[in-house]
Image (spheres, helix red, strand yellow):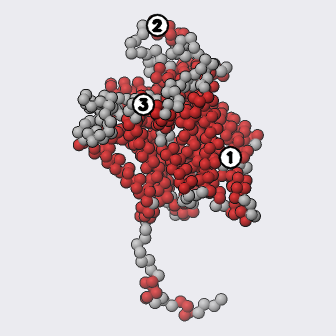
Amino acid sequence: MTNYILQRAIAMILTLFAITTITFFLMHAIPGGPFTREKPLEPAIVAALNEKYHLDDPLFKQYTDYVGDLLKGDFGPSFKFRGRTVNELIGGGFPITARIGLLAVLITVLLSIPMGIIAAIRQSKWEDYSLMFAATVGVTVPGFVMASVLIYVFCVKLGWFPVIWKTDATGWLSVSQYVLPMLALSGYSMSFITRLMRASMLDVIGQDYIRTARAKGLSEIRVILEHALKNAILPVVTYLGPMIAALITGSFVIEKMFTIPGIGYQYVDSIGNRDYTMIMGSTIFYAAILIFLNFIVDIVYGFIDPRIKLGNIKEV
Amino acid sequence: MEYSADLFQPIHESERINSGIVRPSVTYWQDAWRRFSRHKPALFAAGVLLIIILGAILIPFFYPYTYDQQIRTARNLAPSFQHLFGTDKLGRDLFIRVVYGARISLSIGFVASIINLTLGVIYGGISGYIGGKVDNVMMRFVDILYSIPLILYVILLKVVFQDSIKAAFETTALRSLKFLGPELILIYIVLGSVYWVGMARMVRGQVLQIKNNEYVLAARSMGASGWRIILRHLVPNTVGQIIVTVTMSIPDAIFTESFLSFIGIGVSAPMASWGSLASDAYKGLASYPYLLFFPALAISVTVLAFNIMGDGLRDALDPRMRK
């Protein structure tokens, strides 16, 4: 097990390094540099700016400096918001994004696993059909459409929520304001996991050991929850990594639509503003979070599925 | 045991005919088609897609409006017989814009998938066919790519190259292709060049598996060349899975493009993809919800149809995958 964790950890560090390098050189491949505007600035100003942000150093030195700063946890200054650092921007938005994301993960797992199980044990009954219909709609409708519908129905027509989301003085949203973003964010994953859980549950229920458990006279509930669930839930655990990725991409859209000042909103904003350090920093930050969470999922998976060949990843 | 001579009589004529092969043998493709056509939902989905594709190609030729034509007297009209899906705030007919959006969105789906396919098959094929150390190194690289959140790199590549590709289309020989729109071409390239990893893994797995089959060994022992083994054994046996993967990857590309359009780095006006139509509609959602409804419906129906058809194709082309 230690070997497995170590191997994954090394892979994680290598990947992070690769990501930082790719991101850095891609961002510096933009022709003209960050100060190219519609109206050209005076050459002297550009030179001064370049000097201030060390853009006149040789590229490789810039790279080593950047990586060195990253290792100290410093993402550098924002190009757009003078006097603010990327760290401040990310630090300000991340707690809100993380809170909505966690709520979305929680509601997804708590609702979709039972729904998948119900659909499986009531296969070809109305419960199954209605759940699968909803889940199919959920995976074919883009997130921003789902969010638009929620906003239209609950904010515009019913007026249950304000149309403009606002944080209070402490920088948090009020409790009721989490409801719609959370729903919009979890819609896709919830549908996906419900389908996944149903398919995998049906697969497991057909196996011999479940027949044995039934033959022993166990109640159906115990057969499902004690015997079938343990194996049926494995594919869902594997999907947790991609799901977190989907939630993060979702947060770009959802935060923009609900005007929530999280990092997703800032990231989309920085793309529009061409705030290059912010784009670079956010990309690396997002990638690091995702890779770290994937690492955790890998380890959890190694613990719960003893069949996994430790350190021997030769999947087909 | 003794064998007497009368055990070895030639069989009677009638017996010979009865045990002969009466029906013509069914080829893989005939068999696949038979299974596919029995899968009614998939057949229906294929029909829907055919209608959408034909509509996207043909309707603009005889429709009375064009996608960028602004009718001053017809702004923000609700759906009617005159304008099937209504008009937007500039007085443009939404129906023709959705049809035109189908051209853009579907072409992104197809072109990105074809680039994925080419890169993935070459990379995965080489890795699986050569095997050994080369395979190991190539697959470690794929593992790294696989764990990177690729959507971030789609965004990043789009941001990095959008200015230079515009410049390239202004100044170089590419100018004659300008009507396609540099943004659109960049989306083709970016989506195509980032999402080939899954395809490469799949092809490599298939190749590894087939390569070790006895019939390949038999072919090799008979002196078949590498190319003959690739063309006669590897390609025909992987093509089914490849078709399925490509079919499933088209809706992903359409989804990703609509996401890019929504965050403001998709195709630019007056061009319209389904994503950019939906994104534009969001701003006027409270007053004109139908502007969002039709593009959203188009995306959903198409994505659903591709998924259902993909399921049918999987059952038809890869019978081992069936439950």
Where the N terminus of chain B falls, by quadrant?
bottom right
Check disc 3 and report the residue beneath it.
B286
Q: Residue at x 60, y 26 (%)?
A: A174
Task: Give coordinates of residue A66: x percent, y percent.
Answer: 60, 20
User: Amino acid under label 1?
Assistant: Asn
Query: Toward which corner of the image does residue B84 lie, by quadrant?
Result: top left
Query: Toward which corner of the image does residue B17 lie, by quadrant?
Result: bottom left
Task: Give coordinates of residue A123: x percent, y percent.
Answer: 58, 58
Which one is earlier in the sequence, the residue at label 2 or at label 1?
A: 2
Check disc 1 and report the residue beneath it.
A312
Query: Toward which corner of the image does residue B176 lie, by quadrant?
Result: top left
Q: Are marks 2 and 3 on the same chain?
A: no
Chain letter belonging to callout 1:
A
Give the distance between the C-alpha atoms of the residues marked 2 and 3, in whole angstroms.
45 Å
Nearest the viewer among A91 and A56 is A91
Task: Give coordinates of residue A301: x percent, y percent.
Answer: 69, 44
Q: Dot 2 lies on which element?
A: helix
Chain letter belonging to callout 2:
A
Give the distance between the C-alpha atoms of the residues marked 3 and 1, in whole angstroms.
55 Å
The residue carrying pointer 2 sits among few (fewer than 14), some (14 to 19) or many (20 or more) residues within 10 Å by Cα, namely few
The answer to whether any part of residue B210 appears in the image is no
User: Amino acid under label 2?
Assistant: Ile
Nearest the viewer among B322 and A7 is B322
- Front of the two marks 2 and 3: 3
Q: Residue at x 39, y 30 (%)?
A: B287
Q: Residue at x 46, y 7 (%)?
A: A45
Q: Dot 1 lies on which element?
A: loop
| Image mark for residue A45 | 2
